[in-house]
Amino acid sequence: MKLGNDKMCFACGEDNPISLGLKFIKTGEKTAQAEFVPKEVHQGFDGIMHGGLVTTLLDEGMAKVLNLNEIMALTAKLSVRFKKPVSINGNLVIKSKIIKNRAGLYFTKAELRDKKGELLAKAEAKFMEVKEEK
């Protein structure tokens, strides 16, 4: 399997016209961060971001912190805890980090907070490292 071209990724793809446009930056050795402002098209109930898209933000954060550390991996298990409704048009911050690695299985965490720092959702995931075929 070969990973690497994510230009059509729904979450971060530069060539995908409906991409969320997430741009993660490395903030530490094992941490990353991005910002996102949900629009009306991202809602479930009126004024509230769809829970599946909240999950997407968290999953992408954990995938990107691995990618930014030159680890190619796919989500194996994901658990999300929703703490508060995520309002449409509010500035959000996604923070993610690598917790540990055990034989190619990476344990990660992510948080979604508003600009005031209030925790809106959090996730934990396990990612399977993918070795490129030669």
Image (cartoon, rainbow, N blue to C red):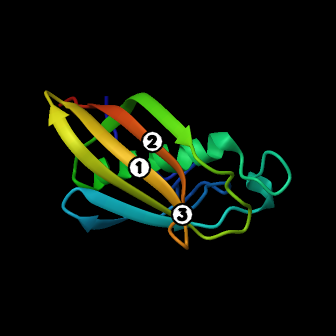
Residue 118 disc label: 3
- Could you say which is closer to the camera, residue 99 or residue 12? 99
Label 2 residue SS: strand
Q: Are dots 1 and 2 in contact, CB under 8 Å?
A: yes
Residue 110 disc label: 1
Residue 65 in the image: state x and y as whole percent.
32, 53
Residue 121 in the image: state x and y as whole percent.
54, 49
| Left or right of residue 80, residue 51 in this image | right
**Compared with residue 87, is residue 105 higher up or lower down, i.e. above or below?**
above
Q: Amino acid at mark 2?
A: Ala
Q: Residue at x 40, y 64 (%)?
A: 33
Residue identified by numbered label 2: 123
Would you call the spot at circle 2 few (<14 residues within 10 Å), some (14-19), or many (20 or more)?
Answer: many
Q: Quadrant of the N terminus?
A: top left
Q: CA distance from mark 3 to mark 2?
A: 15 Å
Give the mark nearest the N terminus, 1 or 2.
Answer: 1
Residue 117 in the image: state x and y as whole percent.
50, 68
Would you call the spot at circle 3 few (<14 residues within 10 Å), some (14-19), or many (20 or more)?
Answer: few
Give the mark nearest the N terminus, 3 or 1.
Answer: 1
Label 1 residue SS: strand
Q: Residue at x 46, y 48 (%)?
A: 60
Q: Amino acid at mark 1?
A: Ala
**Compared with residue 50, is residue 116 higher up or lower down, i.e. above or below?**
below
Q: Residue at x 66, y 42 (%)?
A: 51
Q: CA distance from mark 1 to mark 2?
A: 5 Å
| Left or right of residue 85, residue 109 in this image | left
| Left or right of residue 42, residue 53 in this image | left
Looking at this view, name the residue that lies furthest to the right. Answer: 46
Q: Amino acid at mark 3?
A: Glu
